[in-house]
């Protein structure tokens, strides 16, 4: 089987399901297909796609990032606490500082995980708790100030019809698709997820790449937080919490396996849409938001049941075994 | 002679000693923390304050029983927070402040907890879904269920019996809940150490493939562990209602991380097969003590959250040691 | 490529390596020159793998020196060895099945364009040209995991070549290959030799070793026995050098089990991927062996008996009564035991104690109201430890502190405690020292004599011939050889390994 065949087999189902749900929704509820609704969808999807890509990257190396929620929250409250509101200086800061903050969070994660050799689950769990605390410290209650121009731009359009969120998520998507498929960094990520020992013995600088992956994840979290601050026109320290689970869900539905080494961002758009569409449909059907939690849980379990590798016990193997990972 | 050669390999007997040494060290830390607290604020190490600390630690300790079992199998349970909240909300709803409802409401809560735990277990064993994501997903499910049945506004009241459990004292001094915890701990420790199930738990966590090939019913062992975890979380949530009288949404949120922290601090390995509940007890007490110490030192709320996370990081540097690569 | 480079590539002098007091390698000298194929032979436990691991930087030697191209070297890791142009092709390949052929070959030395992006054209070209250089054509975009074993090996060789290795070690490369594929591999080796590479070839197959090598070194019990040109050896002299003792000293006397002995166990099933039917039986007092090339169905067959699948319409009879084994627990309930090949991953619990390891299959035997009877447990463990002569200081010491041989005894002991009626052993002496090997052989013989149906699968030819009363050879899922008594010879086994005659139902195979 060639790579192309494998990729098709992996990603076509996601998009098929996505189209199925989308068309189904349009048929059931014609207002679904309006331009407004779609723009609304783009807006809601963008942070999902961004964090989905972030989590995919980390999961591909065989790790997990449970601090994404905190990266989002921290960058979000910092974005809303920047000085010189309503001046160009503020806008520049707003563009630069939040992703940088996320980057730093990720770098710290990466260093601790690689230098100490600790399980990513625990490190990012603890790190998330720490940064959540910091966010609550900076902004105990939702509030803060965002420059006037920003909210309008973020939800607005370019050239009068291209919605900004669409541009953002397409840009991020294609950027990382390229990184994963066509850079040494990206291919090394797959190698590390496949078998870290072999990757190392082949000359790949495993530690450096892992640090990079967590740094990028944090930075993308920062980007999402920044976007959300513009969207909501304020800061909220806990805005990122739901995205911890959501990012994993989107990554998994999008075809990335939790054991690492397989998958990618191609399916992320499809995965994010499926996820968001279900929420959207529930809203349209006037179902209470409480059911969304249930729906989220069930969809995730269904997606995992389908994608989880169910190989039975096989004695011996012809490939060297990767190291045992915890919680697997 | 054998002994010398084996000790030269640097592994065996010291390995065993170090397990007990760790536990001793942990309890030493508890003592030191109490003393430090007393230095900062008189009365910190008073009988009544120790009781208060232990009372708070009991709620965490009970949840951490289940988490310990699950981690010993090499898994993790991230649904304990939502299940605690569920137990908390539903017990008030079921009891409605009446003692007459005690038996059936408590039983119902335990069954509900076990049910959700079993879903976790089945997803992990039969659907082969990673425990991390499975329990996260079920947690979301549980949150939804709790919200739906309470319509976002929990009603009801803890019964007087439950209140007694939560805030009452035996002989005027010892909190009842601490006694419950102590009894429970004794049972758990004995079962883990001496029962066939306990032994199979360790086999499953130490090397699951070898366990399967040795005839251990790994699926059953794991599912029971997750089931128990759900049950203990629900019970803890119910007991918390005894303390707070009414229910609170989100009351269990912090406990997910805290239960994991207690287990990790207690020396149980996240890859499974190593550790036990004794360490978790110390871990739970240390965590609660830390909160109290920081409060007494006038550290703001956010700072305390930060400290929680920091302590996990510090403890894993103590326990895990793998060389970096590349 | 100028001939200023010294001809001697590698020199190892006086290498010593011990594990827990046993000398796995005891003062061994070994060398290899450019353009030479130097083979290393010896039984399981002779120290060949350890010596190579020392070379590859995986183990640090306790004593001795390594010289590469005349300069003294000390490797702290395989990466350092690789940087020094040493490459190893393991039996378990170092490939990533989820990645393509091209990626596996260029991994670590990704070809880039100016823009920082990967040059896939270059990668594809490099992959194709390296593979063509060894006479193979594989689409560079193929996923390695979907290739058959022989081709995967080619990719592995390609990978090693792309890292510009000058000294290449081949560890048991021919075990899973057919004769034709071995021929292709040998052409490649000769070509590498012509290109001036130094090749170290490790194998159990003595005829192949004699065919391909320039020099041969024999190791036994960690020591160097002899190093000489291949021409000066014959199979007999090699075996004598490898074994160095009378066959009767290592292997216990076989039973003269006859065909009228009682049938203890019978098997009749259709193997899964090959859809071939196999039927055989095991008689009282005999040790039944399974031979043939690796991956011809022996594993599927044996694991099916333990309830791990791989067989459809399986019909098993123990003592004449039909039994159903849909999973290991059912298999165990019928008295079937399996000693797996990879003890670290499948048989032993490294972090648990000796006691816990020995009791793993019999926990429920010593229960009272759900609790384990400690005193009784301790007693049976002590008895088993004595019976198997396992060297321990305490029952509570962790299993990983034991030597390979003692760990293997733990696995066997675990099953002996179970008192099985059928025992399957897969590669029972892999990575086990010679002294323990003899004890294990005696155990196997005892089991057979006591009326347990014993089946052994091993790739060690000497072991197969020495331990088993009867040998079933398989090829492509078919039963192609049934050898008994004096007919069990390496030649007959090899002949049957490539035969396509299905002998199921034939007179000699019932």
Image (cartoon, rainbow, N blue to C red):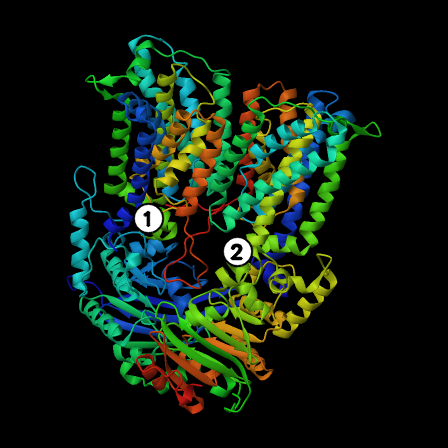
Subunit of mark 1?
A
On whether disc 1 and disc 2 are found on a single subunit, the reply is no
The reply, left or right, for residue A158 in relation to residue A48 is left
- Compared to B251, does C399 lie above or below? below
**Which residue occupies 45% across, 29% down?**
A242
Secondary structure under badge 2?
helix
Q: Nearer the viewer, mark 1 or mark 2?
A: 2
Q: Which mark is residue A191?
A: 1
**The C terminus of chain B is located in which quarter?**
top left
Q: Which mark is residue A143?
A: none
Q: Is residue B183 visible?
A: yes
The reply, left or right, for residue C124 in relation to residue B263 is left
Q: Is residue C427 visible?
A: no
**Which residue occupies 43% across, 53% down?**
A310
Occupied quadrant, residue C243: bottom left
- Compared to B182, does C251 lie above or below? below
- Crowding near pointer 1: few (<14 within 10 Å), some, many (20+)? many
Where residue A44 appears, as percent x and y from the top left, is 35, 25
Occupied quadrant, residue B114: top right
**The N terminus of chain B is located in which quarter?**
bottom right
Where residue A276 appears, as percent x and y from the top left, is 37, 30
Count the numbered circles shown.
2
Tell which residue pokes out farthest to the right in this image: B171
The reply, left or right, for residue C57 in relation to residue C261 is left
Residue tagged 2? B208
- Crowding near pointer 2: few (<14 within 10 Å), some, many (20+)? many
- Compared to B101, does B192 lie above or below? below
- Cα separation, mark 1 vs mark 2, equals 25 Å
Seen from the viewer's position, the closer of residues A297 and A235 is A297
**Which residue occupies 41% across, 53% down?**
A322
């Amino acid at each position: 089987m060639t790579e192309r065949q494998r990729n098709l087999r992996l990603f076509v189902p996601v998009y098929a399901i996505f189209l199925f749900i989308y068309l189904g929704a349009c048929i059931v509820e014609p207002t679904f297909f309006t331009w407004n609704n779609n723009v609304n969808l783009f807006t809601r999807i963008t942070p999902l796609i961004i964090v989905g890509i972030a989590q995919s990257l980390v999961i591909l190396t065989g790790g997990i990032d449970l601090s994404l929620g905190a990266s989002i929250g921290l960058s979000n409250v910092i974005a809303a606490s920047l000085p010189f509101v309503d001046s160009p200086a503020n806008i520049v800061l707003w563009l630069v500082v939040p992703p940088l903050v996320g980057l730093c969070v990720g770098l710290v994660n990466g260093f601790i995980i690689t230098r100490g050799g600790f399980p990513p689950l625990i490190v990012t769990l603890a790190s998330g708790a720490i940064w959540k605390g910091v966010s609550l410290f900076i902004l105990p209650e939702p509030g803060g100030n965002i420059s006037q121009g920003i909210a309008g731009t973020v939800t607005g359009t370019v050239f009068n019809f291209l919605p900004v969120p669409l541009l953002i998520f397409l840009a991020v998507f294609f950027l990382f698709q390229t990184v994963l498929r066509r850079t040494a960094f990206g291919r090394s990520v797959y190698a590390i997820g496949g078998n870290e020992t072999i990757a190392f013995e082949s000359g790949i600088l495993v530690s450096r790449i892992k640090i990079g992956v967590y740094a990028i994840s944090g930075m993308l979290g920062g980007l999402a937080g920044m976007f959300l601050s513009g969207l909501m026109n304020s800061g909220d320290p806990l805005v990122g919490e739901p995205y911890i689970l959501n990012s994993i869900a989107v990554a998994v539905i999008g075809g990335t396996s939790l054991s690492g080494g397989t998958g990618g961002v191609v399916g992320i758009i499809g995965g994010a849409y499926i996820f968001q569409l279900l929420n959207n449909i529930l809203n349209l059907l006037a179902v209470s938001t409480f059911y969304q939690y249930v729906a989220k849980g069930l969809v995730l379990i269904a997606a995992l049941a389908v994608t989880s590798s169910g190989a039975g016990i096989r004695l011996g193997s012809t490939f060297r075994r990767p190291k045992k990972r915890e919680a697997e | 002679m054998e002994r010398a050669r084996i000790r030269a390999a640097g592994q065996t007997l010291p390995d065993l000693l170090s397990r007990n040494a760790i536990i001793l060290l942990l309890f030493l830390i508890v003592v030191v923390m109490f003393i430090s607290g007393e230095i900062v604020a008189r009365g910190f190490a008073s009988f009544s304050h120790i009781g208060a600390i232990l009372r708070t630690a009991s709620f965490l300790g009970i949840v951490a029983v289940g988490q310990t079992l699950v981690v010993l199998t090499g898994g993790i349970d991230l649904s304990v927070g939502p299940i605690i909240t569920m137990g908390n909300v539903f017990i008030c709803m079921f009891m409605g402040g009446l003692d007459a409802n005690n038996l059936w409401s408590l039983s119902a809560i335990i069954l509900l907890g076990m049910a959700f735990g079993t879903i976790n277990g089945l997803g992990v064993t039969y659907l082969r879904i990673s425990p991390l994501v499975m329990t996260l997903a079920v947690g979301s499910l549980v949150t939804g269920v709790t919200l739906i049945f309470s319509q976002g506004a929990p009603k009801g009241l803890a019964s007087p019996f439950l209140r007694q459990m939560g805030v009452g004292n035996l002989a005027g001094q010892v909190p009842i809940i601490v006694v419950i915890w102590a009894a429970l701990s004794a049972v758990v420790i004995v079962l883990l150490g001496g029962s066939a199930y306990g032994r199979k738990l360790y086999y499953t966590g130490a090397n699951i493939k070898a366990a399967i090939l040795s005839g251990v019913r790994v699926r059953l062992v794991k599912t029971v562990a997750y089931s128990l975890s759900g049950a203990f979380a629900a019970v803890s949530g119910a007991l918390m209602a005894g303390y707070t009288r009414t229910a609170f949404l989100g009351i269990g949120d912090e406990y997910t991380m805290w239960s994991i922290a207690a287990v990790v601090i207690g020396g149980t390995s996240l890859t499974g097969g190593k550790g036990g509940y004794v360490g978790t007890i110390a871990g739970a007490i240390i965590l609660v003590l830390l909160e109290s110490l920081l409060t007494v030192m006038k550290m703001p709320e956010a700072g305390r959250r930060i400290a929680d996370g920091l302590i996990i990081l510090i403890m894993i540097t103590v326990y895990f040691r793998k060389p970096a690569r590349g | 490529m100028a001939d200023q480079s010294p001809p001697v590539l590698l020199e190892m002098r006086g290498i010593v390596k011990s594990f827990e007091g046993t000398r796995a390698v005891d003062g061994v000298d070994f060398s290899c020159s450019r353009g030479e194929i130097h083979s290393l032979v010896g039984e399981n436990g002779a120290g060949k793998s350890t010596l190579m691991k020392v070379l590859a930087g995986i183990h640090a030697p306790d004593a001795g020196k390594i010289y590469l191209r005349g300069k003294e070297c000390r490797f702290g890791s395989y990466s350092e060895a690789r940087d020094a142009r040493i490459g190893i092709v393991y039996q378990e390949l170092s490939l990533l099945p989820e990645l393509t052929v091209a990626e596996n070959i260029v991994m670590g030395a990704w070809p880039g364009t100016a823009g920082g992006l990967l040059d896939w054209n270059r990668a594809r070209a490099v992959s194709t040209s390296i593979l063509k250089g060894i006479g193979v054509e594989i689409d560079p975009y193929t996923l390695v995991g979907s290739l058959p074993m022989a081709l995967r090996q080619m990719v592995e060789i390609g990978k090693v070549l792309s890292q510009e290795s000058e000294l290449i070690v081949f560890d048991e490369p021919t075990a899973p290959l057919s004769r034709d594929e071995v021929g292709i591999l040998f052409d490649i080796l000769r070509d590498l030799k012509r290109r001036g590479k130094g090749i170290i070839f490790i194998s159990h197959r003595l005829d192949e070793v004699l065919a391909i090598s320039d020099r041969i070194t024999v190791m036994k019990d960690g020591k160097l026995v002899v190093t000489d040109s291949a021409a000066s050896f014959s199979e007999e002299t090699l075996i004598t050098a490898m074994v160095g003792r009378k066959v009767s000293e290592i292997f216990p006397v076989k039973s003269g089990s006859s065909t009228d002995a009682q049938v203890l166990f019978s098997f009749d099933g259709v193997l899964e991927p090959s859809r071939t039917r196999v039927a055989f039986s095991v008689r009282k007092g005999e040790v039944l062996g399974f031979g043939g090339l690796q991956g011809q169905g022996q594993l599927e067959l044996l694991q099916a008996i333990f309830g791990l699948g791989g067989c459809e319409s399986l019909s098993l009879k123990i003592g004449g009564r039909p039994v159903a084994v849909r999973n290991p627990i059912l298999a165990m309930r019928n008295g079937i035991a399996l000693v797996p090949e990879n003890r670290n991953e499948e048989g032993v619990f490294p972090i648990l104690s000796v006691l816990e390891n020995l009791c793993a299959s019999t926990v429920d035997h010593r229960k009272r109201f759900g609790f384990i009877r400690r005193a009784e447990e301790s007693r049976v463990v002590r008895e088993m430890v004595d019976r198997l002569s396992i060297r321990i200081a305490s029952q509570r010491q962790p299993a990983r502190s034991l030597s390979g041989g003692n760990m293997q005894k733990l696995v066997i002991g675990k099953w002996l405690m179970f008192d099985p009626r059928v025992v399957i052993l897969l590669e029972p002496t892999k990575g086990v020292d010679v002294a323990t090997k003899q004890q294990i052989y005696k155990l196997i013989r005892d089991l057979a004599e006591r009326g347990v149906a014993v089946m052994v699968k091993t790739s060690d030819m000497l072991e197969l011939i020495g331990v088993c009363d009867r040998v079933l050879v398989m090829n492509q899922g078919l039963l192609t050889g049934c050898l008994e008594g004096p007919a069990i010879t390496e030649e007959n086994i090899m002949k049957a390994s490539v035969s396509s005659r299905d002998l199921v139902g034939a007179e000699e195979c019932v």
